[in-house]
Amino acid sequence: MDAMDGAAPVTTAVRWPGRAAGLALACHPGPVVAVTALACALAAGVGLSPGRFALVGAAVLAGQLSVGWCNDAYDAGRDARSGRRGKPVANGVVSVRTVWGAAAVAGVLCVPLSLACGLLAGTVHLAAVAAAWLYNLRLKATVLSWLPYAVGFAALPSLVALAAPGAPWPRWWTVAAGALLGVAAHLGDTLPDIGADRAAGIRGLPHRLGATGTRLLLPVPLLGATAVLVLGPPGPVGAGALAVLGLAGAVALVGPVLGRWWRKAALAGAVAVAAADLALLLVSGAALT
């Protein structure tokens, strides 16, 4: 619950199966699954041992769960006032205290799981989780709202590389591409809710830019991430990589134009480019180190 808002979410009598489902939904399962799956895919790409692979996946899962539950618990008052649907804490399906407790448990578990991946790897991951909590509690409503996303996505290839035997440093282009994809993820995730968020008093970077400005900016970090992934590694550039770079460039030009008629055009194109960028990262997984 947002303690600064002074508004409490609706409270209703809900049986345990409903509360359990509400708790699961409150963790933001889509991003939790997506980020954990990406980390596991990168870990598989660099050939981590089964034990280290499991540790990386468990650490990222615990961190993402803590961040998702923290987000819904802290925003419960604001969500209740604005009448947002699909928010089990604000709708009274599960209590704020329960979700805060779940966030705390997941956060505590994240510490030993992260450090078990290696001191450097664990420190990097815990810094990213801390940045995500800072986003929920403070930076979400500031011009620096993009920064925790950049830190979090840059930390994924860093965590995987540093968890490998010998803790090798990650290649710079994987970290840079991750950071740029993080900025794009923030812009794309916020875009559909800019109007409602602004009405609730949130003033992050996308809200200051407005829907039009965010649509225009969204392709820029995507194109930058693609260019870094294509041109950063040494050696000749393959035809497939050039095709992805061309796709990103097309989105940068066409997305904002189509956005005048289809509100989600820029976001849909950005998702397609992000998927292609992630495929480039996975295909070159061995190059992370």
Image (cartoon, grey):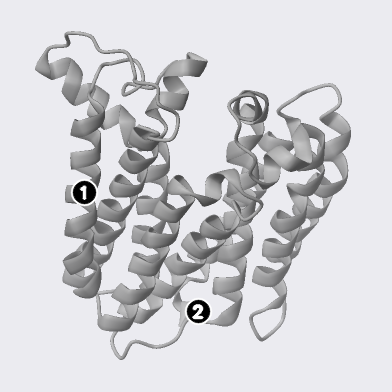
At a point 16% along the width and 70% down the height, the residue shown is 51
Q: Is residue 46 visible?
A: no
**Position in image of residue 7 (x %, y %):** 40, 22
Q: Is residue 6 above or below residue 172?
A: above
Q: Nearer the viewer, residue 54 or 70?
A: 70
Amino acid type at circle 1 is Ala
Q: Nearer the viewer, residue 70 or 242?
A: 70
Image-based side of 229 in relation to 137, left or right: right
Give the mark nearest the N terminus, 1 or 2.
1
Q: Is residue 180 above or below residue 210?
A: below
Q: Is residue 179 visible?
A: yes
Crowdedness of circle 2 by 10 Å Cα count: few (<14), some, many (20+)? some
Task: Report which quarter residue 18 is drawn in.
Answer: top left
Image-based side of 33 in relation to 94, left or right: right
**Position in image of residue 126 (x %, y %):** 33, 67
What is the secondary structure assignment of the residue under circle 2? Answer: helix
At a point 38% along the width and 73% down the height, the residue shown is 124
Residue wearing tag 1: 104
Amino acid type at circle 2 is Ala
Q: CA distance from mark 1 to mark 2?
A: 35 Å
Q: Nearer the viewer, residue 29 or 135?
A: 135
Point out which mark residue 56 bears: none
Q: Nearer the viewer, residue 273 or 55?
A: 55
Q: Is residue 171 above or below residue 1?
A: below
Name the outermost residue toward the top. Answer: 13
Quadrant placement of the C terminus: bottom left
**Position in image of residue 148 (x %, y %):** 52, 58
Mark 1 or 2: in front is: 1
**Position in image of residue 170 (x %, y %):** 47, 81
Task: Report which quarter residue 199 is drawn in.
Answer: top right
Residue wearing tag 2: 287
Quadrant placement of the N terminus: top left
